[in-house]
Image (spheres, helix red, strand yellow):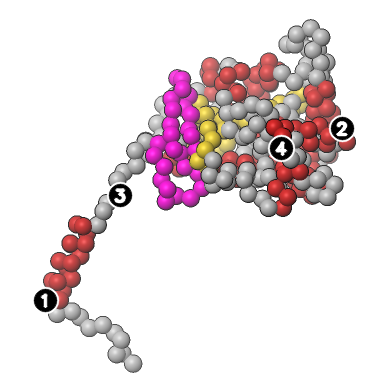
């Protein structure tokens, strides 16, 4: 019964095995160290394929994503003072995710606001990821097939892990966004409990199932760029559960435990608008945000801040102002003093 137990090798055989092992180690090819920005094809998920310094404290990462079907998209980082991702001894940085709206991209926040000049953000890593012209921060239904694009998986799984592993992002995070990105900020905080310590939505699509007008409006966005609108969440009746799973109003209970900031105008001409400006979109989102605020109160949320400022359209001057107004709450959740 012990016939298969190997016996100790003879001294000659042991020497032969040692020489063979040395030869194999010498002849085996060694893997070269990765150059900066070179992809590591052995790692699944997302990989950085290029790094570009675009301005002081601003770096663009070109990220190839499996969740996006192998496509490469950009992520802009606004880096804190003293940021050095190669210094593994330093604690990772608290992180603010800033999400862009429909028809924008990863450059929108730095192009349209003073976020890069905001002193209170010099101790925070600001992440501004690409989310598609009308990606809606969702893993698209694609008529039940799923797959590309899966924006939610890209952001909350692939990109998050990549930033925390290689780019100095810590695990204390908050998220904010405008319009489509406002909905995304609420969705990510609700659908991933514990991932974000606070969330802020500026003129966000806060309750797309509010009424027929709201449904028709977001379906119009879904149909942008000649897209099949049913690819995103399916039909609002037949796939009602999918719609509800992406409607912040129906996820209000999941937002009870964190600070929430909601702001919106009413769509009429405001102090930061050109004379005669109006916005039916802002008026719709205003109704949606009031509905969400009421639902949050109903389910017992205690840390909800609302700024429904009346006259104002769907425009960047308001979103820049609201970012600054919400920063004390967001940075407080990160334990960073504004």
Please name the residue that numbered disc 1 is placed on: 12
**Element at badge 2?**
helix
Please name the residue that numbered disc 4 is placed on: 227
One can see residue 275 in this view:
yes
Marks 2/3: CA distance?
A: 58 Å
Marks 4/3: CA distance?
A: 44 Å
- Taking the spot 75% from the left edge, 20% from the top edge, the residue there is 314
The local crowd at label 2, few if under 14, some if 14 to 19, many if 20 or more residues have their Cα within 10 Å, is few
The local crowd at label 3, few if under 14, some if 14 to 19, many if 20 or more residues have their Cα within 10 Å, is few
Marks 4/1: CA distance?
A: 73 Å
- Taking the spot 24% from the left edge, 57% from the top edge, the residue there is 28
Q: Nearer the viewer, mark 3 or mark 1?
A: 3
Q: Nearer the viewer, mark 4 or mark 3?
A: 4
Marks 3/1: CA distance?
A: 33 Å
Q: Earlier in the sequence, mark 4 or mark 2?
A: 2
Q: Position of residue 301 (x, y in %)?
A: 76, 38
Q: Nearer the viewer, mark 1 or mark 2?
A: 2
Please name the residue that numbered disc 3 is placed on: 31
Task: Identify the disc placed on residue 199.
Answer: none
Q: Seen in the image, is 334 located left or right of residue 283?
A: left
- Taking the spot 64% from the left edge, 26% from the top edge, the residue there is 104
Q: Earlier in the sequence, mark 2 or mark 3?
A: 3
Q: Nearer the viewer, residue 90 or 53?
A: 53
């Amino acid at each position: 019964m012990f016939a298969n137990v190997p016996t100790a090798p003879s001294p000659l055989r042991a020497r032969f095995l040692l020489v063979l092992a040395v030869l194999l180690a010498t002849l085996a090819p060694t893997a070269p160290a990765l150059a900066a920005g070179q992809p590591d094809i052995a790692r699944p998920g997302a990989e950085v394929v290029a790094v570009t310094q675009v301005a002081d404290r601003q770096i663009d990462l070109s990220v190839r994503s499996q969740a996006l079907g192998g496509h490469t998209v950009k992520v802009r980082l606004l880096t804190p003072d003293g940021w050095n991702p190669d210094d593994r001894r330093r604690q990772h940085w608290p992180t603010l995710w800033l999400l862009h709206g429909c028809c924008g991209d990863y450059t929108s926040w730095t192009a349209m606001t003073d976020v890069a000049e905001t002193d209170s953000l010099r101790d925070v890593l600001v992440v501004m990821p690409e989310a598609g012209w009308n990606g809606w921060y969702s893993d698209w239904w694609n008529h039940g097939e799923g797959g590309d694009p899966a924006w939610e998986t890209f952001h909350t799984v692939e990109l998050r892990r990549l930033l925390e592993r290689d780019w100095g992002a810590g695990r204390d995070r908050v998220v904010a966004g405008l319009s489509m990105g406002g909905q995304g900020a609420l969705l990510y905080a609700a659908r991933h409990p514990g991932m974000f310590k606070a969330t802020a939505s500026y003129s966000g699509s806060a309750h797309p199932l509010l009424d027929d007008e709201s449904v028709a409006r977001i379906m119009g966005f879904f149909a942008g760029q000649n897209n099949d609108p049913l690819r995103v969440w399916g039909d609002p009746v037949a796939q009602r559960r999918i719609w509800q799973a992406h409607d912040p109003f129906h996820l209000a209970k999941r937002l009870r435990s964190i600070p929430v900031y909601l702001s919106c105008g009413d769509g009429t001409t405001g102090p930061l608008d050109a004379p005669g400006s109006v916005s039916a979109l802002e008026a719709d989102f205003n109704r949606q945000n009031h509905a969400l605020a009421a639902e949050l109160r109903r389910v017992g949320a205690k840390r909800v801040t609302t700024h429904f400022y009346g006259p104002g359209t769907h425009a960047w001057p308001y979103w820049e102002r609201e970012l600054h107004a919400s920063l004390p709450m967001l940075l407080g959740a990160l334990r960073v003093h504004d």
